[in-house]
Image (cartoon, rainbow, N blue to C red):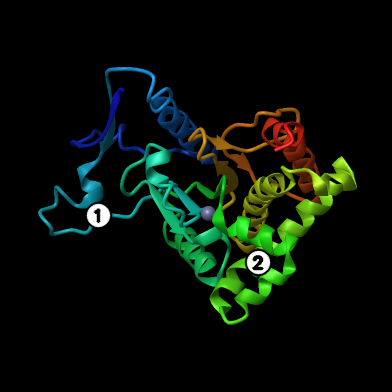
Amino acid sequence: MKTVDITYRYEQQDAEASRRPADSEAALRRLNDGNRAFAALLEDFSNQAGGIQRIISVDPSDLGLLSGGKELPKQRPFAAIVGCSDARVPIELIFNEGPNDLFIIRVAGNSLGTEVLGSLRFAVEHLSDNLKLIVVLGHSGCGALTSAVDVFLNPTDYLSLAGKHSLRYVLDALLIVVQACAKKINAVFGPDILHHPAYRRALIEASIVTHAALAAYSIRQELQNRPTELQIAYGVYLLETRQVWTPYANETNGSGLMAAPHNAAEFVELGDAILRSERIASLIKTKG
Ligand SMILES: [Zn+2]
């Protein structure tokens, strides 16, 4: 079995090395490249021998290491990421980033509560010197979406939440997405799909992507006064491959973070792309 060392190396950097992405395109590229490098690092982990080392270069001034404690480091993330609290999705790690690179907000189900939107608004208003991108990151097998799908498929389960307002609050926001995805799956595959053994799993995974896309779209609507160069993207981190996946038209495999949909027509396109994607289609084909 091989070993993989991921090392944060604090070393004084020149201005060029510590420069942040110049625009949202560069920020998106950096995150996608970082995730691909992270996923590739762990490929065939159990099948190969030897050691692999990945060094993530960190500017010591980002943690105030060179100021002798006299000055606070300046906060300068180039991307804000709304992700799930799920412990299997460590966001800096999966994008190959270090301290002070990402402004991260994590809540179960990566939904947009008031505190999440308030945190994003703070980042947009106070960190705009470097902030070029906002990302909503869902992940495969998300427990929050799984619970929402189970309640949708068996509404009597909702009764067990009667005394748990905080859990209902998390689930209620997800049910409309699950309902929309169920309608789409039904329209594409026909009513017999309800009896397919993989229907529940397909509904969960379709809902996870759609929920991330809807959250990203909602952020764009909520933050209309943001600087024009600040873009909004979304994607789904796959626990299976450690890669970020986003299905889109004419690309059944999907890959990397994508810009949030702009309108209803693009959501319809997204729905088609999700159901044509190999991930979802293979579930339906293989009869669970
Ligand atoms: Zn989750």
Establish if 123 lies above or below 162.
above
Location of residue 17 in the rendering, given as x and y in whole percent from the top left corner: 30, 32
| Amino acid at pointer 2 | Ala
From the viewer's perspective, tell me whether residue 198 is left or right of residue 122. Answer: right
Q: Is mark 2 within 8 Å of ligand 1?
A: no
CA separation in Å, label 1 and label 2:
37 Å
Crowd class of label 2 (few under 14; some 14 to 19; many from 20; radius 10 Å) = some
Q: Is residue 219 in view from this perspective?
A: no
Q: Which residue is mark 2?
A: 173
Q: Amino acid at mark 1?
A: Pro
Q: Which residue is mark 1?
A: 73
Residue depicted at 75% across the width and 42% down the height? 270
Taking the image as shown, residue 119 lies to the left or right of residue 41, namely: right
Which residue shows up at 39% across the image and 19% down it?
47
Q: Nearer the viewer, residue 43 or 120?
A: 43
Where residue 238 sits, quadrant-wise, is top right
Place of residue 178 in the rendered image (x, y in percent of width and height, measured from the top left)? 72, 57
